[in-house]
Image (cartoon, rainbow, N blue to C red):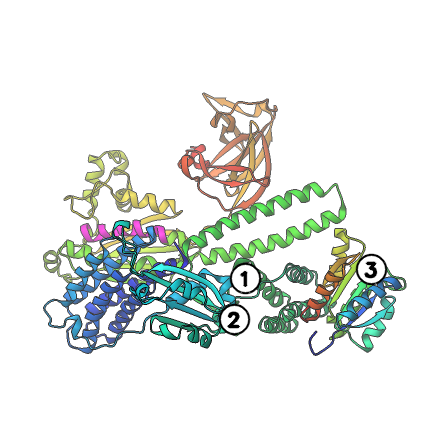
Amino acid sequence: MSDKRMRVMVVDDAALVRLFYRETLRKAGFIVDEALNGLEALEKVLSEAPDLLIVDVNMPQMDGITFIKTLRRQKPPVAGIPVLIASTEAGPQDFAAAREAGANSYLVKPIEPDRLLAFAAMMCGVAP
Amino acid sequence: MNEFLEQFVIECREQVEQATADLLALEKSPLNIERLDSAFRAFHSLKGGAGIVDFDAMAEAVHGAEDGLSYARKGTVAISTTLIGDCLACLDQVIQWVDEIARCGDLPKDASKEAAAIVARFSRGDGMGPGADPRPEVEQPVGWVATILAKHPDAAREAQCALRYTPSADCFFSQEDPLARIARLPGLLTIDVSPVHPWPQLCDLDPFQCNLVLVVLSSASETEIHKALADILDRCHIEALEATVRRPASSLSLDARSLLEAQLTLLESTDGDDFAGKVASAGAVAANVFLAQCDNGLAISIEKATAQSLAEGQTAPIARAIEAILFEEAAKPGAPLPFGTEHETTARALRIDARRVDSLVDLTTELTVAKNAIGHVVALAQNGDEGLEQLLKQRFAVLDRLIGELQQGVLALRVLPLRHVFQRFPRLLREIAAGLDKSVNLVTEGSETEADKAIVEMLFEPLLHVVRNAIDHGIEDKAARLALGKPAVATLGLRGYREGENVVVEITDDGQGINVERVRQVAIDRGVVTAEALAAMSEAQVTTLIFEPGFSTAQSVTGLSGRGVGMDVVRTKVVRMGGTVGIESRPGAGTAVRFTLPFSVMLTRIMVVSAAGQKFGIPLDAVVETLRVGPDAIARVGAAQAIVLRNQTVPVIDLREALNLHEGDRRRDAILVVANVDGVSSALRVDVIGERFDAMLKPLEGLLSGTPGLAGSTLLGDGSVLLILDLTELCR
């Protein structure tokens, strides 16, 4: 990990999933913030912008797709935060919807730790 | 042939062209120092090139000419016709060798003899033998470093040093074991062993003489290598490799690649108010991918492109930047990435191997097929899964756009200036005119006019034919010209210009023009036209008779033209390029021959029809309309058939009969494709009319080439071959 530690916000309503992200990413040197749904994530992002957002699709209050659409319509630099969608859905319409909303990449759950770290590192611009 | 030789051959041809042009100019104006310098530089580069690829004989011959020119530069010898002639002879020899090298990768065996003859030309009589030249030897080129780096790209990445060790011939007697020595070298990556002199026959081989050159890459530093070889340094060349030489681009991992591709698709989905967010995030991710690989240069260029996209409100700059990197990487791992400010300068001259361009053209054709295939799947998916259909439609649109751009790019690649063909003429004119004892001055104009590469290349032959004819038959000999009050030196013009979508090439001379009376006489004598037809012709029409097959006005058969092939060959060649030939002649004042040629090779829109279960393509531009008529509408006229269409009788050609296909039943109603060929309508009866698409027509090759009734072939969506019918032939 380079000198600057990267801040990742994980947005997922399932506590177990958040735990997985937290443990995996922290061990690799990332700072991990958490939010339980899109609405909460939006509030947190506007107060402190992370380097990467990892977002679930199905969440109460505000789902992942709506969250990304809203995020992309904010002012810069918030609008331009890289987003990784993580979803159990793997149909082409899910990919298309995520892309149209403005997600930068898509991983299908269950996610392997190595793969998560590889993507997180690349999307934050740090050597894995 | 390896890449070095390919490059060498390309460069040689260019240098020879340059030198030839310079020498011819020098002959006209011997005091033109710039031309002399330019010619000298061309010879110098030729020699350097020959040295790099180890063609010693060629280097020697060119060195002779270079010496000759260097004395001229110093003023110790005058620029004479003899000197120019000798230099041109040297270039002729070089071109012969280059052709040989291009063919089989090496100089012919007797090259050194020929080289000696060339060198002898320059050392005769003037008391300035090669030894008298005090010019210091040029530095030894270090092409071997480039060679070994190219040969071992993997090792090249780690190598810090390249070493070339030539053991002395008697090294075995001084207890030196070169191979063992090198094998112990620190950081050894690769060893290439080659003979110093070509290996002799086994019976002549002296096994006690060392005839080896060892070329080595090592990851150790230059100092370490120096230390290890301290006692044999005099027989070693050690080159420290600069980081820039070694650094082939880091190749992207699969994940990085897929991330970059995902950013491209993301960029395609932008609309309206999420534009800034999408572009900024895609740009950030793309830049981060490179940062993660410690490639700051690429990250910076991506950031620049992102800023440009945001400023312009267009996704194009960032999308192009990512595409360029992905494409570069895929096309050529290890190539340095041409990115940054100098990349943005406009109109850079590119040197492209013709075969690579041709393969690009083939690739485009394949891509077009791929696009058609997806279009086909879209049609299938219409009943199935909605998401799938949506996705496919998007991919189709993307492919369509990409292919459109690619094709534009490819066509632009194929554009060459007419200079490429024009520049061969000064030299030829000198020879042709000298052979006929006529003096001709060539004036070229518009040689920067561009045309498709295929056109430019095919142009040479018909052009040469017309030029020969003009000099041989058009231009009078010196005495006759003087008697007529014309200047003794005739003028021949080669002019190129754009005219709308066409490129026009004109060949003019100020000779005697065409003797219309004689043309009439010959046309009758040789049965080219009937007397009645001839009587009805205007003078201009009579003049064009010289393009008819079997016509040749040559009174004397000279060595140059009038070998029984007339101007009809010229017309055939030009028509094959899709062009037309025109001629204007003013008796006593001269002749102008004009080729009007298409600018580029274009896509043809194809309609698929079928007869007796077989599919054929018809170029859509000839199709006027399609009809379905009842069986009674077609009337038999003798052996033929016809229908009446808007008070006009149109002949019906049954595709089954025309192609001799008689399988399966056919429906009662007739489906007709009405085509207009050369202003005449014909109806083609087919069984079914199918899809339409764009294709680049490929002429038939091999056994099928020249089959009457077929214009070419392309591929259908399912990959099967579709033959394109030649309507001109069928409707005749």
**Foreground residue among B560 and B165:** B165
User: Relative to B518, does residue B66 appear above or below in the rendering?
Assistant: below
Q: Provide residue B248's location: percent of width, then percent of height.
A: 52, 66
For residue A31, side relative to residue B282 (left or right): right
Range of magenta residues: B457-473
| Element type where label 1 sits in the image | helix
Is label 2 in contact with label 1 (beta carbons under 8 Å)? no
How many callouts does the rendering have? 3
Distance from the alpha carbon under mark 3 to that under mark 1: 35 Å
Chain where mark 2 sits: B
* Residue drawn where x is 57% and y is 36% of the image: B626
First in sequence, mark 2 or 1: give its number.
1
Q: Provide residue B382's location: percent of width, then percent of height.
A: 72, 43
Amino acid type at image mark 1: Glu
Residue beneath disc 2: B344
Q: Quadrant of residue B678?
A: top left
Q: Is residue B466 within the magenta segment?
A: yes
* Residue drawn where x is 32% and y is 71% of the image: B140
Q: Which numbered circle lies on residue A57?
A: 3
Quadrant where the N terminus of chain B sits is bottom left
